[in-house]
Image (tube, grey):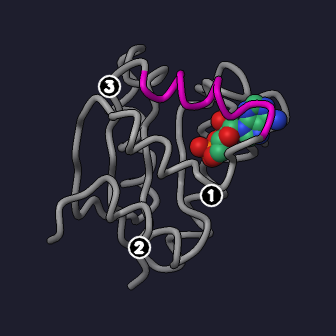
């Protein structure tokens, strides 16, 4: 069974959306197998977004993700990586498909409520940053 990593971002934690977001994943046959709530460190966020270093939105992104608490989830399910990305929707909430998490809860490009890994390699890379070895 495939695993994927999700981050519930500060804008969603701040607005009490943790439960609603996890509920949507669970209703879609994704099982929470690890969970971690924390205030991210600068080092963690820089490592997580290293591929975006130098882009125009990088500083804003790092500043935002270190601004408050996040919840990291490890989800397990059939085709989890692709399915979770579909449930989350497009990066920009304005362009996200109806019913997706980002359409429902996202505010803008940066405060888009959720992150999910886009490949098996990223799941491993991101899990090493955010989760204790299980
Ligand atoms: P996420 O899925 O966490 O991964 C990379 C993040 O970069 C993305 O969510 C957005 O929050 C942010 N991002 C990507 N493209 C842009 C953009 N054009 N403007 C602002 N932020 C962006």
Is residue 30 positioned above or below 14 on the image?
below
Q: Is residue 28 left or right of residue 26?
A: right
Q: Residue furthest top?
A: 15
- In the picture, the disc for residue 69 is 3
Label 2 vs 1, first from the N-terminus: 1
Q: Residue at coordinates 47% horizontally, 79% vertically from top-left? A: 78
Is residue 20 positioned above or below 133 on the image?
above
Q: CA distance from mark 2 to mark 1?
A: 16 Å
- In the picture, the disc for residue 12 is none
For the N terminus, the quadrant is bottom left
Q: CA distance from mark 1 to mark 3?
A: 22 Å
Q: Residue furthest bottom?
A: 1
Decide if residue 34 is in sight here.
yes
Q: Position of residue 26 (x, y in %)?
A: 36, 54
Q: SS class of the residue under badge 3?
A: loop
Q: Residue at coordinates 45% horizontally, 41% vertically from top-left? A: 45
User: Between residues 35 and 65, which one lies in front from this camera angle?
Assistant: 65
Ligand 1 sits in which quadrant? top right
- In the picture, the disc for residue 124 is 2
- Most prominent secondary structure in the magenta stretch? helix
Q: Residues within 10 Å of mark 1 (few under 14, many from 20)?
A: many
Magenta residues (range): 55-66
Q: Position of residue 3 (x, y in %)?
A: 40, 73
Q: Residue at coordinates 74% horizontally, 31% vertically from top-left? A: 57
Q: Position of residue 113 (x, y in %)?
A: 54, 31
Q: SS class of the residue under badge 2?
A: helix
For the C terminus, the quadrant is bottom left
Q: Position of residue 112 (x, y in %)?
A: 62, 30
- Is residue 29 shown in magenta? no
Residue pointed to by mark 1: 85
């Amino acid at each position: 069974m495939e695993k994927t990593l999700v981050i519930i971002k500060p804008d969603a934690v701040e607005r009490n959306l943790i439960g609603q977001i996890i509920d949507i994943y669970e209703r879609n046959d994704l099982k929470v197998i690890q969970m971690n709530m924390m205030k991210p460190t600068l080092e963690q966020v820089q490592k997580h977004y290293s591929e975006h270093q130098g882009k125009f939105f990088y500083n804003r992104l790092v500043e935002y993700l270190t601004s408050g608490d996040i919840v990291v989830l490890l989800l397990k399910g059939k085709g989890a990586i692709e399915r979770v990305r579909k449930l989350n929707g497009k990066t920009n909430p304005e362009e996200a498909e109806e019913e997706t998490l980002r359409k429902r809860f996202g505010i803008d490009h940066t405060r888009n409520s959720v992150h999910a890994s886009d490949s098996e390699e990223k799941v491993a890379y991101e899990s090493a940053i955010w989760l204790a070895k299980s």
